Image (cartoon, helix red, strand yellow):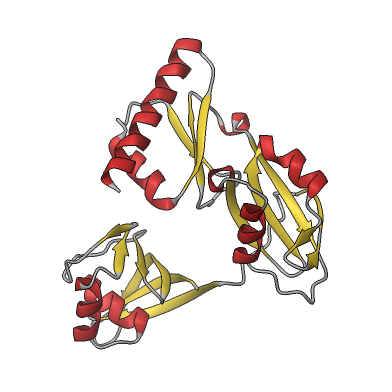
Amino acid sequence: MIDEDKLLLDKAYDAITLSQRRNIPRFFGFLNEHESLYLRQHLPKSADVLFYGGYEGAVRLMLGAGAEEEDFPITALEFTYKAEFDLRHRDFLGALTAQGIRRETVGDILTGEGRTVVFVRDEIAPFLLTEVDQIGRVGVKVGYADVSDLPVPDDIEELVWTLSSLRLDAFVACAAHLSRDKAARLIKSEMVTVDHVTETEVSRPLKDGMTVTIRKYGKFVLTSQIGTSKKGKLRIAVRHYR
């Protein structure tokens, strides 16, 4: 991962340099969460870069050097189908990659009832519009999406937890319904990442906005601290991506 991160950072610097020399925006991605976080942490704050995924709150983002949001080569496509078919994120991603489409050209996939919006790089949009009429065995129609009315994914839960502390082991124990000892063993076994980097320190403190991913249990985002209980324990809001 370290070598891949260095190559990613080099690519970002190349985009910045080319944008400055030619006075035009340069783009690459879509990036996954680890990649965009790594670049945010390692690029200088003065760098003229913007991360954008096609809508506010996007998870998979493109990097644009010398760019504004309206410059990004992102198209939102809408796939419609009979609501009785329960198509999920993995169904769309599997079908698109089976067509030879590279993962970095596909952004967020927002599934809903009978309607899914997929953010893609501009260059692959014509192919999807004209050549794709099925996802798996389900017939679909593909058109341009209205990004002011996006589906709310049904695989997200908004939760409120009560914890004794914001240590990682306490968080994992609550998320996975385990004892603190078993949660600690899970962490030490490299089954847990914090902000998309493997974390083995059980006492790692967590802060608002951090993402904890637990293998086999899903991804959890600590969205905010909302107070304390009558017994003095912490109450936190958590978003669970199942």
- Residue at point 28%, 61% (across, down): 207
Asked whether the viewer can see residue 206, the reply is: yes
Q: Which quadrant holds residue 40?
A: top left
Q: Position of residue 32 (x, y in %)?
A: 45, 50
Left or right: residue 179 versus residue 203 is right
- Front position in the image: 191 or 183: 191
- Front position in the image: 110 or 97: 97
- Residue at point 64%, 68% (across, down): 88
Q: Position of residue 39 (x, y in %)?
A: 35, 39
Left or right: residue 196 versus residue 159 is left
- Residue at point 36%, 26% (across, down): 13
Left or right: residue 102 versus residue 132 is left
Left or right: residue 99 versus residue 138 is left
- Front position in the image: 24 or 188: 188
Q: Position of residue 143 (x, y in %)?
A: 81, 49
- Residue at point 29%, 75% (across, down): 171
Q: Which quadrant holds residue 133?
A: bottom right
Looking at the rendered structure, the number of numbered marks drawn on it comes to 0
Please tell me whether residue 102 is drawn above or below residue 217 in the rendered image: above
Q: Which quadrant holds residue 75?
A: top right
Asked whether the viewer can see residue 166, the reply is: no
